[in-house]
Amino acid sequence: MPPRVDHGRSRREQMPRGTGTESVRVGRALVLLVLLAAGTAASAQAPDCGGDFEAWRGRLQAEARAAGVSDDSVALLDAVEPSAKVLAHDRGQAVFTQDWLTFAGRMVNAYRLRVGRERLEGLADSFARAQQDHGVPGPVIAAFWGLETDYGAVQGDIDTLAALATLAHDCRRPALFRPQLIDALRLVDLGWLDPGELRGAWAGELGQVQLLPSDYLAFGRDGDGDGSVHLKRSAADVIMTAAAFIEHLGWRPGEPWLTEVQVPEGLDWSRAGAYRRLPRRDWVSLGVRAAAAAPLPEDDLPAALLLPMGRHGPAFLAYPNFEAFLEWNQSLVYTTTAAYLATRLDGAPPVTRGNPDPGLNASQMAELQRLLALRGHDVGVVDGILGARTRAAVRAEQQHLGLPADAWPTPALLSRLAGD
């Protein structure tokens, strides 16, 4: 599954800590409080990075011991070496250069829909308990489960300690990944993972919903009652943990997350965007209609109009619960796909494709970003990926040029900016 990316802010920067289910909550909480108190003191110093890897690894091992990690677990780092493959993954995430219909067409496929529905039916008790305890509906949990690992079938086979050590030693984001490395060792100490199970995604995510070690520790829930949390093996643990994590990301029980809509041709397109909310009644007054048979409620629920491929492509109203999807992964392409898959698993029909204007390939997008930056727009890194900053800059230029401001970059817009 594609890694989580940050085209603005990222939930990876938060990394809170927590405890587990009722049956093991007290004992685990005491263990974690001791470990985390030691970890806080040890991490008060700014993490180092770069330089001789062996020397750096020795300093990290000393930090892990000071944080309360056992000698046996610290020794797992003895043979760890940096991985060029991991760095290559970190520098390029080309999957997110795909347009939404292409990406969603690949990811929301017959297999994920069929198996997701089978999981929802076969594990109905676990999903019901997850919703009761955390307010998160089963289709939402199943959507992330399916996109991340095909419901556990593809969890990744990269050495987690090597991946995290590589990213912690690299000076791009050491403060993010160094604590993850120590928390991965804590998972071994707690018995939640065997050393041989420390394998997963290139960025260190583990288990069937691909959580970073700190999130695994914080939100791990014992869904099957065996006194431990096995996110690589136990479906019940996966469901309860994912629900706890999504709840933490801001889920609002009993509210929708995404509705496909039809939009009038004469709409003021500058109103669209993931962070431009209006009460749902206002969208109705502007002529926005539900794509399905049921009408849109005319209430005060805040909603944003999403046009992932511009005004002629698919259109959605996204509600406050959509923020939880964005906190999981900052890519609008991934986020909208996950939310859409959840609606399909909840019974919604396939999306109306529309007739979107042609988009840009990666090299054209990078050229557009360069031109936008020359005009004073903050597009972040020129990477050929249509992120939130690039969309905002496109919208601003469309407004400046008197074009429909739907934030969808096209070859015509690129030619117009290149010719100015």
Image (cartoon, rainbow, N blue to C red):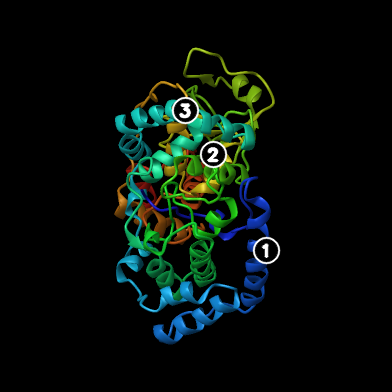
Inspect the image, locate mark 1, and give the three-letter code of the amino acid beneath it. Leu
Inspect the image, locate mark 2, and give the three-letter code of the amino acid beneath it. Gly
Q: Say which residue label 2 marks.
A: 273
Task: Tell me which residue sits at (46%, 44%) in the image.
Answer: 332
Of the numbered discs 1 and 2, the one sitting upstream in the chain is 1
The answer to whether the residues at label 2 and label 3 have Cβ atoms under 8 Å apart is no
Can see residue 66? Answer: yes
Q: Say which residue label 3 marks.
A: 343
Q: CA distance from mark 2 to mark 3?
A: 20 Å
Q: Is residue 243 left or right of residue 89?
A: right
Considering only vertical position in the picture, is 100 above or below 57? above
- Give the image location of residue 88, x and y in percent: 32, 66
The image quadrant of residue 348 is top left
Q: Secondary structure at mark 2?
A: loop
- Give the image location of residue 282, x and y in percent: 64, 24
Relative depth, front residue between 162 and 68: 68
The image quadrant of residue 136 is top right
- Give the image location of residue 45, x and y in percent: 62, 79
Q: Say which residue label 1 marks.
A: 33
Task: Tell me which residue sits at (44%, 87%) in the image.
Answer: 55
